[in-house]
Amino acid sequence: MRSWASSPPTRFSRLPPRFTDPTPGPVSAGETAGAASLAVHTQDLAKRYGRTVALTALTMDVRRAEVFGFLGPNGAGKTTAVKLLVGLARPTAGQAWVLGAPAGDRPTRRRLGYLPELFRYQPWLSAREVLGLHCQLAGIAAASRRQEIDGALAWVGLADRADDRVGGYSKGMQQRLGLGVALLGRPELVLLDEPTSALDPVGRHDVREIIRRLKANGTAVFLNSHLLSEVEQVCDRVAVVDRGRVIATGTMAEILRGDGTVRLRVQGLDPAARLGAFGSPVVEGEWITFTGLEPERVPELVAEVVRRGARVYAVEPRTRSLEERFLQLLRESEA
């Protein structure tokens, strides 16, 4: 399979005149140098449409060769953020850098891949013709187009339907084709806006595998989604956004960090044993539940129970699903 490390032109190299390069405000040399080492860096990025606030004070970093999840409910500002990053909209305030250059920079667009949430291709064209058209728009050399097209078709699983008209494709197949277009030109950063929303379970699995392969080849992936299971399975780090503002960011472990609840299944523990130093235990048969216990103190708790002559058969720290944590964050944001 071909490498995605190099960066020939992509379809963002020729956009209509209205998509002119933004003129950023003054920034420090240190901030510019820091942005150059990242795939994406934003600082207090904001966007308003009239009186409607679509995005406010967005500050985040996306590292090279990582899968970054941008998670939030519908209407949270996720698509607005993506449009600002690829240069399809101008910010009202704040700064954004993509691959070390100001967001919207024309040469940098050649190093991006983008799958929008809503798109439509000419139904009378075949998948091969659609990809060929985008190769022309991207300025990819004619001698390389066949290899680019065949590679993209293979990656998204459409090689056996390459010459069928797009009008006969299912919605899921059209989504795969859109992903293939995003992979043309060996991009260094791929921005995917709800890439699995129209796919069946097999298709979603295939997209996850593509994302993992992109990461393995050094490509950064910005995954914009409201599907918690997809984000949980492939993302290295996550930003949760609500009503245009990031309310949490971190690795999956940091986002899902529990509330210090741990359960022990024990036998032979004296009911009068005092374990208050580890919190207020709740006893249910052989199970004892402790709340508010730091993870580092769990071995100490187990050692103390054993020292008192009891036998420990199970230790179960309470873990939260991404859905539970996501809903908790939204409730806290609304409070």
Image (tube, grey):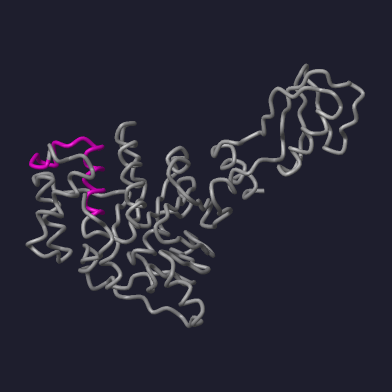
- The answer to if 165 sits in the magenta stretch is yes
Is 280 left, or right, of 108 in this rendering?
right
> Residue 249, how many percent across, how many down?
55, 54
Magenta span: 162-183
Residue under the point 28% across and 72% down? 106
> Residue 164, how many percent across, how many down?
9, 39
Residue under the point 67% across and 48% down? 335
Residue at the right extreme, as displayed = 272
Is 21 left, or right, of 148 in this rendering?
right
* Viewer-side residue, 260 vs 42: 260
Which quadrant of the structure image shows residue 222?
Answer: bottom left
Q: Is the magenta stretch mostly helix, strand or loop?
A: helix
Is 30 left, or right, of 148 in this rendering?
right
Q: Height in image: 33 above or below 292? A: below
> Residue 25, how many percent across, how many down?
46, 80
Q: Height in image: 244 above or below 268? A: below
- The answer to if 30 sits in the magenta stretch is no
Q: Height in image: 215 above or below 64? A: above
Which quadrant of the structure image shows residue 317?
Answer: top right
- Count all numbered tags in the image, as a single digit: 0
> Residue 199, how many percent across, how many down?
31, 36
* Viewer-side residue, 185 vs 84: 185
Residue under the point 62% across and 50% down? 333
Residue under the point 26% across and 48% down? 179
* Viewer-side residue, 120 vs 137: 137
